[in-house]
Amino acid sequence: MHTAQPYTIIFIGPQGSGKGTQIERLKAALERDDERRRVVDIQTGRRFRSLAAKQETFAEDKIASTLDSGTLQPDFLTALLWGQAMVDQLDPKSHLLIDGFPRTLAQVPDLEDAFRFFERGKLDIINLVTPETIVRMRMESRSRPDDTPESINERLRWYREETLPVVQFYRTRPNTRVHDIDGTEDIDAVQASILKALQLEP
């Protein structure tokens, strides 16, 4: 499979909805079936956790402490991380898979600027619709240090208040398809639904 145009795909869903797993699987599928294009995978949360693990600077220490509390990282830090990743890796011919931004409406304009710069107008949004009861159970069972009851509550709160409006924005954005995917299914079934929505079925 060689797609006519590169994909720009944003994954949106609460933590615990399986975004990281699904983005890795989609990346592998694209790399396997569209070898002529590079697949750029930017997962902001993973980049923040990598910085927090170092704890060698004031910023890294503060990121670690705010990750533990479940609060959103500042917009400038988020934009810095994904912006640098794009500058280092992205060109107009590459597939682009994004997880972790925009998480607020305030982050959308910077991303729109980046899309114009990298000559990307058409977007696909994978919206992993997963009830809070399910994602709470998943987060509690994965034993990650920052998955405390307090941080889980805080992350679910800001997802409801800050990120869900982003989904609504994309439903009205031109040249954008929002695919509502049932995140309660098993991993294989979710991936199959994503491939079908993107018309990437074998």
Image (cartoon, grey):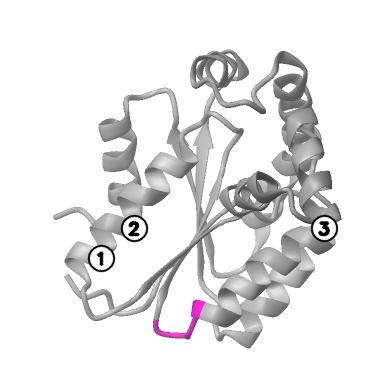
Name which quarter of the figure residue 189 lies in.
Answer: top left
Up-down relation of residue 140 to residue 157 (above or below): above
Quarter the N terminus occupies: bottom left
SS at circle 1:
helix
**Label 2 close to label 1 by CB (< 8 Å):** yes
Q: Is residue 106 visible?
A: no
Pick whichever of labels 1 and 3 is earlier in the sequence: 1
Q: Pointer 3: what residue?
A: 75
Point out residue 164 in the picture as x, y percentages from the top left corner.
71, 40
Q: Pointer 1: what residue?
A: 31
Looking at the picture, which amino acid does disc 1 mark?
A: Glu
Residue at the (67%, 28%) spot, across then down: 146
Residue at the (55%, 80%) spot, across then down: 88
Mark 2: few, some, or many residues within 10 Å (few <14, many ≥20)?
some
Point out residue 92 in the picture as x, y percentages from the top left corner.
47, 85
Mark 3: few, some, or many residues within 10 Å (few <14, many ≥20)?
some
Observer-nearest of 54 and 15: 54
